[in-house]
Image: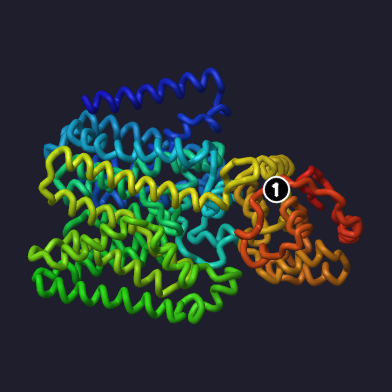
Amino acid sequence: MFDVIAIIANLGVIIYLIFSLFTGGLDSFSSNYIFIGYVVFTTLTLPFLISKNIFRQRLVSFTTAFSFVYFPLQFLFTYLVSRITGFSLGELLPFYTLFNIVLWNILFIYFILSDERSGDYSEKVLKRVYSAILPGILFTIFASLFIRQTDSIVALDYLQHLVVPNRMYFSDMLCILPGQCSNLFLQHGYTTFYHILLGNMVSFLGTDPVKTIFVIDVIYPIIVSIPLFYIFKDVTKSTLWSQVGVLLSLLVFVMGGYDFVFFIPQTFALFLFLMFYREKNLSKKKLLLASILLMLTHFIIGTYLSAFLWGRELILKHIDRRKEVKIYYVILLTSVIFFILTNIAGFSFEKLVQVDEVKVIGSLTNPYYPNNLNVFWQILGPIWLFVLIIFVTNFLERKVSKVYLEGITYIAMITVVYFLGPTYASKFTIGIGFFSALLLVKFLSTLNMNIFFKSFVVTAMIVVFSTNFFVQYNRYLAFYTQENGRVSAINDEDMAIVNYLNRERTFSTILSDPYTQLIVAAFTNTETVQAQYMNLDTRKSLLGYINKPSIETYEKLITSPGIPKNDNFDVLYTSRMYRAINNQDDSWIYNLYSLSINNSEDIEDLNEQLIKEMARTGRYPVYVSPNFILFR
């Protein structure tokens, strides 16, 4: 029955797409939700089928994680073909993505029709997969109905990362590191492993990027539910408790870490980590390979997650006596308390060690005492009380549980790192949702409860987690809330200049405010002056020139960091800049998030001296709207 459902669903989508092709043509696919969703789904699940059918391994395993390497290998092969044949990547990459859809269908049919040597037939596997994705679907419905707006982008990370596959596609480039493709990456934090995967879903078929990113956010939690479910099933042996565990894991909004809410490099690393974590015995060779893959996905978070895997194999697995566990817990608790007190006393890596990094970023990235305690509490809210109860209970228990040991260790680890205060310390809280849910579900599943009490407890947990998730997510969305009530990083005014720049291609660099530069870089394949990471001195020089246009302020501007030496740049004056200048607000110089996301205020009474000064430099208004003036 389960394989029949899968076949009918897949066949139904294919028939619909064929019908759409004949009625709307190929162009209709760029904004077709079904097509976009099918591309995203097949891309993210193809490695599962590769692991199962080609390598004959478990659906969720070490091999599954490494099957994602298929995408960069395929891209490298495509690049070599383009060099040999003379075809550009822009001509070949659409076939690259279409081939993956065909391959997915071939492997899917083979999976359905063939018997597994292990006796793990498709019917049995699909039943478990359906059980796994059910909580993911419920989570997506909840988030879509009560939190997210349709066609919204609520993570600026997407815009920055989108530049890389776009540059590969449009500029025929092969980049190992994102900084080789774009000047938006001041430091190398990852390879382009993630970006090739993102390009496969967003860029290479020319689908609407805003719609596609929204669909990724809808589908990604459903896909993540699969490894989550398998881990919980290994721990609890219960389908119901496993589904509860998946749902609770998804219902934790980790500010900065984002866990399973967005598909960005650090959350992709967490996704791969789950597959490695499921392996009960990782040899040193596999540990080394897993570490390499995680670090290639995200240099810092990958190293962080790898360190935990090594610690589990080399330390935690050898703690098997009650006395050892108690001593270990005392060490953990002492470490957590010590580093919290040290932070309260004023120590922070960001302020004392990473001074140069802070200068590049433009401002401190972390809250400090007492605000950081409040932010850390808000991650789980009242759920922290349950974590504390589980810690105390496990400390007093006679039986040694590796699940408790690992979960408590991970939470202690992220707490210590958070209060050490490196730049963007909140990123290091990634994974806390999964491990807190793992502790809670493991604890509750061992209690002897009747069906009524169990139903009450499960319902109460879901309500508590959902409420905290709703509050945290909406608090995060405050920055993306526009004056008209729309909640998205993208507004209609910005898309007008995007459409113009896509029609009227330019080889000049666009110089504007940091937020607008990020929009332009992401959607037009146009160079900017480091977008949101524009140098502080350059921001000051730009503001000085706009405020007091003169030969002196222009000379200061063109000698600022990041400005093209050949004077080949266009100046894009925006409503955001106009609003900031009128309100005498220069806070955006130091922090991108101080700049209004709205670009709706009409530009009135533009400084005539600015127009004359622009003309002196050979720049004239070529695009004028109530919200933009482009001097070229």
Q: Residue at x 76, y 71 (%)?
A: 559
Residue 123: % across, % down = 19, 31
Residue 469 point in image, percent of width and height: 40, 49
What residue is rendered at 78% in x and 63% in y? 567
Which residue is painted at 52% across and 42% down in the image? 204
Q: Is residue 572 above or below residue 306?
A: above
The residue shown at (10%, 47%) is: 448
Q: Dot 1: what SS?
A: loop
x, y (%) of residue 402? 16, 62
Mark 1 is surrounded, within 10 Å at the Cα level, by few (under 14), some (14 to 19) or many (20 or more) other residues, namely many
- The part of the image, by quadrant, that contains residue 533 is bottom right
User: In which quadrant is the N terminus drawn?
Assistant: top left
Q: Estimate the x, y position of residue 341 in percent, counting from the top left.
A: 38, 78
Residue 202 seen in render = yes
In the depicted structure, whether residue 531 falls above or below residue 70: below
Q: Is residue 70 left or right of residue 168?
A: left
Q: Nearer the viewer, residue 299 or 171?
A: 299
Depth order, front residue of 126/479: 479
Question: Number of callouts in the render?
Answer: 1
- Is residue 287 visible in the rendered image? The answer is no
With 509 as the anchor, is 24 left or right in this view? left
The residue to which callout 1 is attached is 599
For badge 1, the amino acid type reads Asn
Which quarter of the picture shows residue 191? bottom left
318 to the left or right of 295: left
